[in-house]
Each structure stands twice: as structure tokens, then as C-alpha cells.
Image: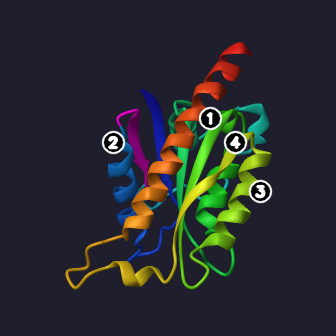
Amino acid sequence: MYKLKIITSTVRPGRKGPVVAAWVAEKAKQNGNFEVEVLELGEINLPMMNEANHPILKKYEHAHTKNWSAKIEAADAFIFVTAEYDYNYPAPLRNAIEYLLHEWAYKAAGIVSYGGVSAGTRAANSLKADLATMGVVPLSQGVNFPMFAQFFNDQNEFVPPAVSHTAAEKMLNEIIRWTKGLVQIKNDQ
């Protein structure tokens, strides 16, 4: 089984990212190829980068950085669940990514985005570009939720449409394909 880390992007009170992350985590568990862990940035609460040394050196001083490093290093692949704030992904996610460097490399990543009319796709595209600079392979397969609030019923339960379930299955299958190859590449180093 591959170790899949699902990372949320939002930290503000009332955020919906954890609900979406729980949905995609359940889809990943049903797939049967993943050991799934959700990393909720609102709970992890990384401060703005406060390490004295550049991440390339991997000389971390703070316990929160060492813990974050261990979580990301242990991953074989990722799914990022991101909202779109001001045409981009939220700053807490950018901060969490930039805390590390080597730990991200040679791992595939799917993106689940949500927002208004753009469905978070501008945030997803920006995130893909930044992930690639960290050595992550961002996949073209993803899940996007336009007009996000429409997918909550009267009991405030998240109820995505059938097309989202199909998109998630395709994304998870691509994560498996890429992870098989990338694990081999990483082991060859």
C-alpha cells in the first residue's frame, strides 16, 4: 500500500476544506491501494516560516518543522485540497510547502479544488506550478467543485455529484500509476 497524505489548505474558522478532505480520504480508502492520512493545516498550525536555515540544508531547529518534515518524508503521494482565495491558493498552504524541500521530491500529487464559478481551477494551476519547482509531479487529473456551496444539503452535509466521484477515481488511479514509477526512481537514487 502507498502512503497517501491529503493536505488541506485553509485555516480560518468555519472552513470547509476538512469536509472535502474527509470525502476524498474516504474515496482513497475505498480504492484499497492507499494508507491514508489527512494533514489538516488548521490543526497543524505551522507559524510563518521561522527556521533560521534554508530548507535545502534540512537543518531544522523547531519541533513543528521536524514533525512536518517527518510527515511529508513518509508520504509516497499527495492530494492537496485547496480553496481559491483571490485567484490563488491560500497562504497557509504556500507556507507549509516552503518549509521543506527534499521531502517533497519524486512524489505525485492530485489536486481537489473548490470555489466559485472557477471551481478553484486558478488556485489549482498556481499550485501545480509551485509543486513542480519542489520536485512534485502534479497530475492533470483532479476534482473541481464550482459554486461550492451548492454541494451542501439542508443538513450541511457534503453531497458531491456523480461526476465528482468519477473524477476522484480517475485521479486516484493516476496517482497509483505515477507513484509506482516515482517510488522506483526515488529508490534508485
Q: CA distance from mark 2 to mark 3?
A: 28 Å
Closer mark to the observer between disc 2 and disc 3: 2
Closer mark to the observer between disc 3 and disc 1: 1
Q: CA distance from mark 4 to mark 2?
A: 22 Å
Magenta range: 32-40
Q: Which residue is mark 4?
A: 136
Percent across and percent down for residue 182 are 65, 28
User: Looking at the picture, which amino acid does disc 3 mark?
Assistant: Ala
Q: CA distance from mark 3 to mark 4?
A: 10 Å
Earlier-in-chain disc, 3 versus 4? 3
The image quarter containing residue 122 is bottom right
Earlier-in-chain disc, 4 versus 2? 2
Closer mark to the observer between disc 4 and disc 2: 2
Label 4 neighbourhood size at 10 Å, few (<14), some (14-19), many (20+)?
Answer: many
Earlier-in-chain disc, 2 versus 1? 2
Q: CA distance from mark 2 to mark 1?
A: 18 Å
User: Looking at the picture, which amino acid does disc 4 mark?
Assistant: Val
Q: Which residue is mark 3?
A: 129
User: Looking at the picture, which amino acid does disc 1 mark?
Assistant: Trp
Earlier-in-chain disc, 2 versus 3? 2
Closer to the camera in the image, 62 or 120: 120
The answer to whether the residue labelled 2 contacts the one labelled 3, judged by CB atoms less than 8 Å apart, is: no
| In this view, 188 is above or below 157 | above
Q: Which residue is mark 2?
A: 29
